[in-house]
Amino acid sequence: MVPKLRLGELLIRDGKLTEDQLQQALARQKQTGRRLGTVLQDLGFVTDHVIARLLAAQLKMPYFEPMIESVDMAVARLLTELQVRKLRALPVGRVGERIRVAVVDPNDWQSIDELPKLLRCEVDTEVVPESGLLELVGRIYNNNDNMQGLAKQLSDELRNSGGADTVDLASLGLQASAEDAPVVKLLQGLFDEAVRTRASDVHIEPHASAVAIRLRVDGHLRAYAEFDSRLAPALASRLKLVAALDISERRMPQDGRFVVQVRQQAVDIRLSTVPGQYGESLVMRLLLKDPMLTRLDRLGIPAAGLGAMRGAIDEGAGLLLVTGPTGSGKTTTLYAALGALDAASTKILTVEDPVEYRLAGITQINVNEKIGLGFSQVLRAALRQDPDAILIGEMRDRDTVENCMRAAVTGHLVLSTLHTNDAASAGARLIDMGAAPHMVAMALQVIVAQRLVRRVCQSCAETMQPSVAQRTWLDLQLGAQGWDPTGMRRGRGCARCRQTGFEGRSGIYEVLALNADLVAALLKNDISRFHHVAQKTLGGAHLAAEAARAAVSGTTTADEAMRIGLRHTGASA
């Protein structure tokens, strides 16, 4: 029997991990109780493919490439989906009288010893990455087919009940206790798929002849399934019921939230409904209740910009502003900035709409416009709580802007977000919203503008040569002699990335620290001058150039970088 190996030691010995990274992961493992391999992946230190290949090499076992073409479907179905997920082991083929089984953890002897009993024959184990195994499970046991079967069952019940508009909710199991009802199983399967694919949003969209289900993964919507249009009211009713909304109200938009248990983790769901031509359109935002919040120095912010942000945070007063469109990762950056503060010795308040993630040691306040509790009202009350730092989810109106400015110039550290295209536009936007130019000049410390780009899948990455158009754009951003194409990558598509060539996203940042020239321009209310000085100050560190560097380094593709960069030519324009 091969001795049990310590994963951390193997990774360090193979040069895939540092001792400092291992200690960080072990500390996080102690907090969360999750497997070390999972924690290492969540922290971004290694991928599960690296772990699997390393274990296979150390144990002298075959490595199983998770491709559906390599799986014998009849053999795979010798175990149920529940058994495969529990044991983290999938039968993939037969050699003579023995069965080949792909396992995630070859040191899990208890699970491996159980396999011959379940399969009733001897087994040969191979090592497979967990993400690859889960992808194969999703395709082999076909969650979509299961959902289509549940959808048909529910559609038949609706037909028998006389139509969706007259259905008895109790008869369809829409009551909260009816966990075996088709609609409940259908939604549970949908949430399971959303978490498995790392979807941030689920869209349920009624049309004339069908109800479409789409998932937003890495910022892009993907079609997932289509069901009978009669299912739309049943799905809406169930979701509104668990979100404590009025199920009889179909003419007005409603917002709510609830929590579901998916894959051994609690997921906070924010539900939004709006009336459409063919029924209520539903959008659900998925938020992990115990997220792996990123440290500020792990966001990928350039060193100079990171130093400017840390300087503002350490100073403990003034306004740190994060700008960008919806879905650009602003909240992640703000939370990472809060993480740089010592919560034990700092009074921290957040004002959010709604509170997205629960943070230990921090007082978080939920805005409720329905009862007149808006950002400006909560902020005024929060200032009477003797805070050292305040996070304001978004500056939406003049009152909120003015209150933030007052807080920033009276000794409080204020962190907030604003919707602008770039850092240089933030000063003009604040003044347009009603802030006095001299208050903006005194309050502003640092402006961060950011976007998200999709990362090249590391499991199927291959070298690429830029096209003529891509070379021209890269030359414009980085200078004709300022870059080397040898590091450029693209993903060819594999099981891990679901044939997209991308897995996950990475931030692109420009950081503008206020200097004397910028403050002088604001004091004179000279917005044109402010913009010009800001572009000059940023130099080659504007959004387009940072996106170009991400492409040249192989983090993302040239096309993905150009999608961001063509809108932000920065100082090179």
Image (spheres, rainbow, N blue to C red):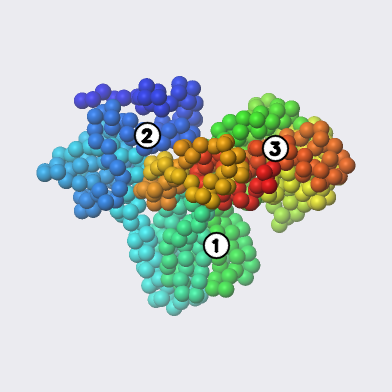
Residue corresponding to mark 2: 50
Mark 2 vs 1, N-terminal side: 2
Q: Position of residue 208 (x, y in %)?
A: 50, 75
In three-dimensional space, the C-alpha distance between marks 2 and 1, rounded to whole angstroms, equals 39 Å
* Left or right, residue 244 beside residue 170: right
Which circle, 3 or 2, is nearer the viewer?
A: 3
Q: Which residue is mark 3?
A: 538
> Tag 2's secondary structure?
helix
Q: Secondary structure at mark 3?
A: helix
Q: Position of residue 126 (x, y in %)?
A: 25, 37
Mark 3 and mark 2 in contact? Answer it, CB < 8 Å.
Answer: no
Q: Image point 41% across, 76% down: which residue?
A: 159
Between marks 2 and 1 in the image, the one whose residue lies nearer the viewer: 2
Separation of marks 1 and 3 at Cα, in angstroms: 41 Å
Identify residue for label 1: 282
Q: Residue at coordinates 59% horizontally, 56% vertically from top-left?
A: 256
Which quadrant is home to the N terminus? top left
Residue projecting furthest to the right: 524
Q: Nearer the viewer, residue 479 or 262?
A: 479
- Residue at (36, 27) in percent of width and height: 7
Q: Which mark is residue 116?
A: none
- Mark 1 is surrounded, within 10 Å at the Cα level, by few (under 14), some (14 to 19) or many (20 or more) other residues, namely many
- Percent of width and height locating residue 178: 43, 59
Rounded to the nearest angstrom, the CA distance separating label 3 from label 2 is: 37 Å
Q: In the rendered image, which quarter is residue 372 located in?
A: bottom right
Q: Nearer the viewer, residue 222 or 546?
A: 546
- The residue type indicated by label 2 comes to Val
Q: In this rendering, which labeled residue sits more in front, label 1 or label 3?
A: 3
Mark 1 residue type: Leu
Residue that appears at 39% across and 51% down: 499
Indicate the amino acid at tag 3.
Leu
Residue 307 in picture, x, y percent from top left: 66, 28
